[in-house]
Amino acid sequence: MKAIVYSQAGGPEVLRLVERPVPEPGPGEVRVAMRVSGVNPTDWKSRRGGSRRELAFPELVPNQDGAGTVDAVGAGVDASRVGERVWLWEAAWQRAHGTAQEYVALPEGQAVRLDEGVSLDVGASLGIPALTAQRCLTVSELGPRRLAPGALAAQTVLVAGGAGAVGHAAIQLARWAGARVLATVSGEQKAKLAEAAGADHVVNYRSPDAVDQIRGLAPDGVDVVVEVAPAANAALDSAVLAANGTVAVYASDDELELPVGELMFRNLRYQFVLVYTVPPSAKAQAVADVVAAAADGALPVGDDAGLPLHRFTLEQTADAHAAVEGGAIGKMLIDVE
C-alpha cells in the first residue's frame, strides 16, 4: 500500500511517499480502507516534533483524522463491522500510524460508524475540531456536561476565531444545542464564513469598539468563550464575560497574564482543553454528541457551511500540511485512494 511517512522532525519537506505492507488488525482493532484524511494544526506541530523537536517513533504516518470503510477486523471485534463507513479520531495519538495511508489498523472504538446521511468529507472533518469544540462547550461549571438540542438554550457563547476549524465546529455545535452564538474574526471574508457556520452575530476583534459591540449584543455578558488566543484576547474576554462565566482555552498564543483579583471577585473560570487527555468518560460523551450532531445534519462542511474544502492527493500531503501551517482558511482534505 501507499503511505506518507516521516522519520525526522521538520517542515513539510520531510514527508515522503513510500510503499508499506498492508497492516493486519490486532485484537480489538479494525482495519480501515482510507478514503479521506483530514489535516489539522496538531498534525504539522507533531511533524515538527513538538516543543522538544523529537519524534516518538523512528518512522510515523501523519494525520489524526479521516474517514473510510472497515475492511477487516481483529480478534474480539464483531465481524459485522466489515463494510461499515466510519470516521476516525486520534489515529496517530501515541501511535505511529495516522490516516495518511491507504489502510490503517487502530482500536475499534476510534473508528466510529458514520450515519448514512453523513458524507466521508464530513467524517474526515470531525475528529480533533469537533471533539475539541464539544469539550469547550461542556466544561462550564454552570453548563451541561453533554450537548443535545436545547442543552445550551439559556447560554450565550462567544467563539473566538470563528472561521477556524475548531471555531467553525463550536459555532455549529453551540447553535445545534440552542445557544445564542457570537463570534469574533479579523476580517470580512472570515465574517462571512462564521455567519455561514451559524453565528448569530460576528464582530471584528480588531475594531476599537469590539468590547462595546459584544456588550451591546450581550448586555448581561457571555457565559462561555471558546478561545483560540487567550493571551491576545485576555482583556476582551474579561470585559465581556458574565459573572460565573468560563473561558475554554484550546490553543496557546503567548504567555497568559490574568488579573486574578478581578476574575476571582466575579467567579470567572479558565479551563484549558487538550482533547487527547480529557477523561475517558468525557471523550466518550464528546464522541456520542458529535455522532448525534452529525446525524442531525448539524456539522456540514463546504463553502455554503462556512468551511471551504481544499483537496489534495496522497502524493500532495506535504502541500496540504504547508497550507495548514501557513494559516490557509478552510479544511485541507487528502483523497487517499
Image (spheres, rainbow, N blue to C red):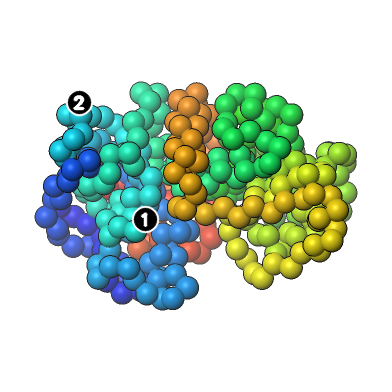
Indicate left or right for 200 with 272 as reference: right
Q: Which amino acid does label 1 sit on?
A: Trp
User: Taking 223 as reference, is 61 left or right?
Assistant: left
Query: Compared with residue 171, is residue 298 higher up or lower down, i.e. above or below?
Result: above
In this view, 124 is above or below 40: above
Q: Where is residue 237 in the image (x, y as percent from the top left)?
A: 77, 53
Residue nearest the viewer, comparing 92 with 103: 92
In percent of width and height, residue 118 lies at 40, 28
Q: Which residue is drawn at 88% across and 39% down?
A: 219
Residue 36: % across, % down = 32, 44
x 76%, y 45%: residue: 245
Circle 1: element type: loop
Q: What element carries label 2?
A: helix
In three-dimensional space, the C-alpha distance between marks 1 and 2, rounded to whole angstroms, equals 26 Å
Name above or below for residue 77 compared with residue 139: above
Q: Earlier in the sequence, mark 1 or mark 2?
A: 2
**Residue 17, numbered label:** none
Residue named by callout 1: 93
Q: How crowded is mark 1: few (under 14 residues within 10 Å), some or many (20 or more)?
A: some
Query: Is residue 199 in view from this perspective?
Result: yes
Q: Is residue 311 visible in this depiction of the protein? A: no
Q: Residue furthest left?
A: 21
Circle 2 residues within 10 Å: few <14, some 14–19, many ≥20: few
The residue carrying mark 2 is 80
Task: Pick the quarter of the image with the C terminus.
Answer: top left
The answer to whether mark 1 and mark 2 are in CB contact below 8 A is: no
Query: Which sits in the foreground, 210 or 283?
Result: 283
Q: Residue at x 44, y 70 (%)?
A: 50
Q: Residue at x 53, y 46 (%)?
A: 132
Measuring from the top left, give residue 149's x and y in whole percent: 60, 24
Residue type (three-letter) at the residue carrying disc 2: Ser
Work out whether residue 9 or residue 191 is closer to the camera in this orientation and state it.
Answer: 9
